Amino acid sequence: MKERLSVAFVAERQIPPAPPPAKTGGVVGWLRENLFSGIFNTVATLLSFAFVAYVLASVVPWLFLDSVWNASSLQECRKIDDGACLAVINERFLQFVFGFYPDGLRWRPVLAFALMFIAIWPALFASAPRKLLIFTGLYPLLAYWLIWGGSFWGPVGVLAGPVLGWACVRWLPGLMRGWLDERLVFLAAVGVGLLATVLWWLFGVTVFDDTLSAVLAVDLDSVESARLGGFLLSTIIGVSGIVGSLPVGIVLALGRQSNLLIIKACCVGFIEFIRGVPLITLLFVAWLLLAYFLPPGTEFDLILRVVIMVTAFASAYMAEVIRGGLAALPVGQYEAADSLGLDYWKSMQLIILPQALKVSIPGIVNTFIGLFKDTTLVIVIGLLDPVGLLQPIRADQNWNGIVWELYGFIALFFFIFCFAMSRYSMHLERNLDVGHR
Amino acid sequence: MKLKTTLVAATAAVAVSAAAQGATLDDVKAKGFIQCGVSTGLAGFAFTDSNGNWDGFDVTFCRATAAAVLGDANAIKFTPTTGKTRFTALASGEIDVLYRNTTWTLSRDVDLKFDFLGVNYYDGQGFMIRKDMGVASATDLNDATVCIQTGTTTELNLADFFRANNMNYDPVPIETNAEAQQKYLANACDVYTTDASGLAATRATFENPGDHIVLPEIISKEPLGPLVRHGDNAWGDIVRWVMNALIIAEEKGITAANVDSMASASTKDPEVKRLLGVEGNYGEMLGLAPDWAIHAIKTGGNYGEIFEKYIGENTAIGLSRGLNQLWTKGGILYAPPFR
């Protein structure tokens, strides 16, 4: 006899697991949830798909199916097919990359570019061997020598300047101690060091270069600045500007917060002046005013002038971005640094700047990207960066009238660079996130 | 090397005065090349070929000058200049001569302190329209929309022309020739106006050039030629006479191909003998080698050959000689006698 139960149903065994209903799982479920949930979203999805299909329907045949890669003129392209005339990029690719850089020497900028990645590796990724930082420090001079050529001892001589200055600061106080007031010793050493560096640059480098060249000449064929162009030029200006503007910007930002009146006034004046003037104006100053002031025939390299101006411009913006980061730190951080007995430089280096810079990363990268794109403005002073090269290429009667292909190609180049920077900044933010927000 | 010269120059800059006037020829010979300012790109006149070398109508005149002075058409450094930088580049000594389709005007000659040395291309402002507009003369363009480059003399000429003919127009301001092409083809304007050579070059790039016509009216004078700084007449003479030599060469039938045989005294024409240095010491007067004109002509041929190669009727630009024909053939190209 069956025992009467007080409940209607008892599960005697576990129900075997079943897949979720088809409507809610898998591809269909995803589609229902994300694309077709409700009437409005369904319509929006369909419209978006229609738009994408419409664009692709005209771009894909134009760019891939009907495009012409081998032709010697636009007219020939049009005869072959009615898609994009990519033959112009095929023919002028090296010109876009190197400008007018001499044919046989093009391995030099390529090598410099490849070495650049080794040089920035330790700066960008903590996993890199720390000793590489020495190479990073030497890289600018190496790249300069590779790209412009000339005697190897020139850049070495330039590098010897700061070394000389540092040596003065390091050893002179010991020698002077005793017959000079203790507080003045350090100041005097710094002064002598600076003076020695400048004098060395002005007079010593030439002698140094000539002497060593006479003993052991290490020469590369020199290439004048007028021959640089295309992406090479953009990269030179962009990378030097980026590398220069961050340290200068940090110094300016700290200077702006300083309690020392003169330093503060100088920094504020510099930042506000540069930010108040368009970059184009600064480029014109670099080109035009200096062209009038310098005696005819002097070679104050135009690209160097432009790099200085671009760096100054980006530094001012960088300073404000970093000032934002400094301001975002709670005052307790400053007090904590003080209470540990750290002096100004130590507290900045160990406590304030690491946090402030981390907060500022998006803004810093934003400035970098802006700077890199701003390099195209050099076109107004007759330097032929990629956009500048469009004009003489399109003036060739073979390619006159071509527009989209060339602009698209240049846009792609800038997109790759800027997108890479933006991805790196996101990577950095993730890595440095200690979750205390 | 350069870094250190740079540093030296930067500090010494103020101390040294701008005293290098009056000896451009010596400078050029000392440095071994000519610095020539050209356009950053103008169809047929200055462009880069597939090897990255500068080429074109104006560029060839530069090269001929280098060949005449230094005996080598490649002894030259080109500085691409924009409309904004060209005069500064010349005035500051960054370039020795400017061959950049620059219109000869009084203020540029006098106020900006340059010397124009002649005209290597006579241009003038014209109009291009779509054929189906059914207009045959620029005086029928009342109430038309006109694509016009802002800040140029063409803008002023246009206003003058329409006012003089009691007509109205709707300006569509544009910045560059490339922008104008796009706007015009997209029917944003009925008329595109700029120098006639530019119109012809633009029209040649269209997919269907036959659908567009350039109206017969030319509404301005645009004599384009080379210029140098005031105050160095010897150098100016050289640039002027290289250009004249190329024009005289066309007059006398001297071409790049036959210049050597002409020079080897097969000719009886005394002016040819003088030009090619067989007779007289005209090269010496200019401070050049006796065979300077031979080098100049060998560079790209005589004026006519250069014209036909870069902008003539067989090129994509397709310009007819027009005013730029020799004076003996109905044009106004006229070089002073070589004696």
Image: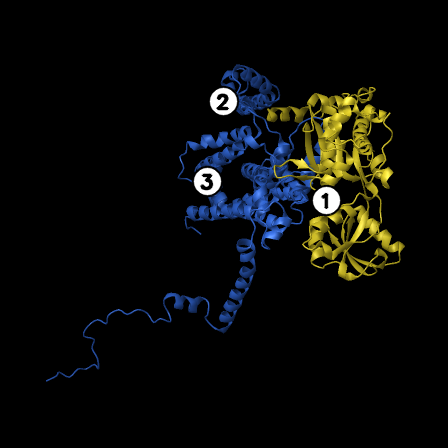
Image quadrant of residue A30? bottom left
Chain ID, mark 1? B
Disc 1 versus disc 3: nearer the observer: 1
Residue highlighted by disc 3: A124
Residue A277 in percent (x, y) is at 68, 43
Q: Image quadrant for the N terminus of chain A? A: bottom left
Residue A368 in percent (x, y) is at 55, 44
Image quadrant of residue B29? top right
Q: Residues within 10 Å of mark 3 (few under 14, many from 20)?
A: few
Amino acid on which the number 2 mark rests in the picture: Arg
As helix, strand or loop, the secondary structure at mark 2 comes to helix
Residue A2 in percent (x, y) is at 12, 83
Report whether A39 appears left or right of B80. Answer: left
Kindly identify which numbered label has been placed on residue A170.
Answer: 2
Is residue B122 visible to us here?
yes
Colouring of the image: by chain
Disc 1 to disc 3, C-alpha distance? 57 Å
Disc 2 to disc 3, C-alpha distance? 30 Å
Residue highlighted by disc 1: B314
Amino acid on which the number 1 mark rests in the picture: Asn
Is residue A343 visible to us here?
no
Instruction: Depth check: give the residue in front, A71 or A355.
Output: A71
Amino acid on which the number 3 mark rests in the picture: Leu
